[in-house]
């Protein structure tokens, strides 16, 4: 497709130009204006509210400004009419045949009209980041699912993505673990379920350290030995890491997630003294109560401790070394961190100190609230890796029941494959379809609902569309819908077309704002527009030509839904 701009971008450019023509010399060249699809066809197909914001600078009534834009010459082959509405909205009505040609171009394009603004740019995505020797908690799972959707979205938009899993594989807990492991590890349990056993050991060792100062001292000594490279401690530590990574990997495989890099905190260990030296050298760090801190009063943030009074480094020190190393190695245009809400202060401090060190790269913290699990659905040890496996098993089991009910005639093998896609999709979509910053409670009924905003609803919509296409082929063998021109005569057809044309904007918006739920909302909207179209407009009984055009709209809807779900990391089986 030669046209690399979305409709919204094109119309925005037109409004911008018309505005400048209407008000020459007003210095409007850089003013931000935006045209968006309307939610109600009575307000036209697209709308712009720029006149409202310009009333003050232009010293005119918004309606007059909008009218002046509407009076500018426009391409009659594209715009049917422009009208001013309400306090000063500009409503744009497009010609149905122009929309149809545009949609035909989209249909002929592999990328469904989505531009690739990321070409030549690099984004480093830091997501998942579970801690070694501890079960992945529910926050890591959300980070994995949301991070992976951002990963897919950015790759599709042409960015070079470096997906880095920043494992928590270093830190004080390893002293307690090493000591505890030597004293009370159960070899068989470690073999069978390493993370559970390590967690048990850690809890036991930690509890003992609270009551027994000698135990705590011994643990500290183990940590120092590890940090100094003691062979035996390194060997044990490495085995903790390897066992943990193996368990995490089986989960990632199941979720369809893969990373370009898995660099734990330990990777940066050698660079920590250098970070401290740099901070000192630039006069950014100072002593405070024996610790070394960076004061962030200008940013209205609490001091950031970069070296503890015992000389040890912390999470902030490691993350500073990580930023510097990533900037140097990958020259990213942005580094994006996906974690739960509890790390907001950490990242604000990290970004502030990084700026002072001269890091110019865009730094973003994408945070989300923790998903609540209603009592009784899962045990309180919610995030446990084993429990997550069970959560996914449970999702597949429930999905299988659903599939057996909806498709009793499907061969059992296929039912299981569909149940896998539907079950996993439901769990992922429950994470992805919510505003990440709102509080959500996971319920099976909502996640697996066949009506409402859920993965199964969208997956079933794809499959139902496929069956319409099957029926067409059976009744009209040799028919070739793609050779018939698209026609958008009916209001519901037109509404569906407008929705389909919004896909590029939805993808761009979800990626730009780091909010996959904006794409999920769009897909749900599209599925609903399709459903009213399908229920109210005759298909196979329509006249020749109209019928083919409608089958084309079906095909394009299915492709758009599928592509959208894929960008969210969700599979849509061909048939359900
Ligand atoms: N391991 C951390 C945790 O469990 C998440 C890591 C996030 N990434 C980072 N560069 N700090 O909370």
Image: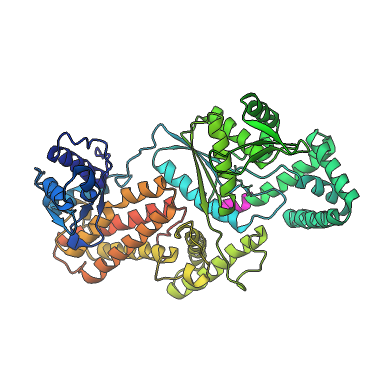
Residue 184, relative to residue 277: is it above or below? below
Residue at 66% across, 42% down: 315
Total label count?
0
Residue 202, relative to residue 297: is it above or below? below
Q: In front here: 167 or 3?
A: 167
Q: In front here: 225 or 242?
A: 225
User: Start and end of the magenta stretch?
Assistant: 249-253
The quadrant of the rendering that contains the C terminus is bottom left
Q: Position of residue 474 (x, y in %)?
A: 27, 64
Residue 254 in view (yes/no): no
Q: Position of residue 160 (x, y in %)?
A: 45, 36
Instruction: Residue at the far top: name it.
Output: 281
Is 405 contained in the magenta span? no
Magenta stretch: helix, strand or loop mostly:
helix
Q: Does 88 sit left or right of 254 as displayed?
A: left
Q: In front here: 516 or 306?
A: 306
Residue 52 in view (yes/no): yes
């Amino acid at each position: 497709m030669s046209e690399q701009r979305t409709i919204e971008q094109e119309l925005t450019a037109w409004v911008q130009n018309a505005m400048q023509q209407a008000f020459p010399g007003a210095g409007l060249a850089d003013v931000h204006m935006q045209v968006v699809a309307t939610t109600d066809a009575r307000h036209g197909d697209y709308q712009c509210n720029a006149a409202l914001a310009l009333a003050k600078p232009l010293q005119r009534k918004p309606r007059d400004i909008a009218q002046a834009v509407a009076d500018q010459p426009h391409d009659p082959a594209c715009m049917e009419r422009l009208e001013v509405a309400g306090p000063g909205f500009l409503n744009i009505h497009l010609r149905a045949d122009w929309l149809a040609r545009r949609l035909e171009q989209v249909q002929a394009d592999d990328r469904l009209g989505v531009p690739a603004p990321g070409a030549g740019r690099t984004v480093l995505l830091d997501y998942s980041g579970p801690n070694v020797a501890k079960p992945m908690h529910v926050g890591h799972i959300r980070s994995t699912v949301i991070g992976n959707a951002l990963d897919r979205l950015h790759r599709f938009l042409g960015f070079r993505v470096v997906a880095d899993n920043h494992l928590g594989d270093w830190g004080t807990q390893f002293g307690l673990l090493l000591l505890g492991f030597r004293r009370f590890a159960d070899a068989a349990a470690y073999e069978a379920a390493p993370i559970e056993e390590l967690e048990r050991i850690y809890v036991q060792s930690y509890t003992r350290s609270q009551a027994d100062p000698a135990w705590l001292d011994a643990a500290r000594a183990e940590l120092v030995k590890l940090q100094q490279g003691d062979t035996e401690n390194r060997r044990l530590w490495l085995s903790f890491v390897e066992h943990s990574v193996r368990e995490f990997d089986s989960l990632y495989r199941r979720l369809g997630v893969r990373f370009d890099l898995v660099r734990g905190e330990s990777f940066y260990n050698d660079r920590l003294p250098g970070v401290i030296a740099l901070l000192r050298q630039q006069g950014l760090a100072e002593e405070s109560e024996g610790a070394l801190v960076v004061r962030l009063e200008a940013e209205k943030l609490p001091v950031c401790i970069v070296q503890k009074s015992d000389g040890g480094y912390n999470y902030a020190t490691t993350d500073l070394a990580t930023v510097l190393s990533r900037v140097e190695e990958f020259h990213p245009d942005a580094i994006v961190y996906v974690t739960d809400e509890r790390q907001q202060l950490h990242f604000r401090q990290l970004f502030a100190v990084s700026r002072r060190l001269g890091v110019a790269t865009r730094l973003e913290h994408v945070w989300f609230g923790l998903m609540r699990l209603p009592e009784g659905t899962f045990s309180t040890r919610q995030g446990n890796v084993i429990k997550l496996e069970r959560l996914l098993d449970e999702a597949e089991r429930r999905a299988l029941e659903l599939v057996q009910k909806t498709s009793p005639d499907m061969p059992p093998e296929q039912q299981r494959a569909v149940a896998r896609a539907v079950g996993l999709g439901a769990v992922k979509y429950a994470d992805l379809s919510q505003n990440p910053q709102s509080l959500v409670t996971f319920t099976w009924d909502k996640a697996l609902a066949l009506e409402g905003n859920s993965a199964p609803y969208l997956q079933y919509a794809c499959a139902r569309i496929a069956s319409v296409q099957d029926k067409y082929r059976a009744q009209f063998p040799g028919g070739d819908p793609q050779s018939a021109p698209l026609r958008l005569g009916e209001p519901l057809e037109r509404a569906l077309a407008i929705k389909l044309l919004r896909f590029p904007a939805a993808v761009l918006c979800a990626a730009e704002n780091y909010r996959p739920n904006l794409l999920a909302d769009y897909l749900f909207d599209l599925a609903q527009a399709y459903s009213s179209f399908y229920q109210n407009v005759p298909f196979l009984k329509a006249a020749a030509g109209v019928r083919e055009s409608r089958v084309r709209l079906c095909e394009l809807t299915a492709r758009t839904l599928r592509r959208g779900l894929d960008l969210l990391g969700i599979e849509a089986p061909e048939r359900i």
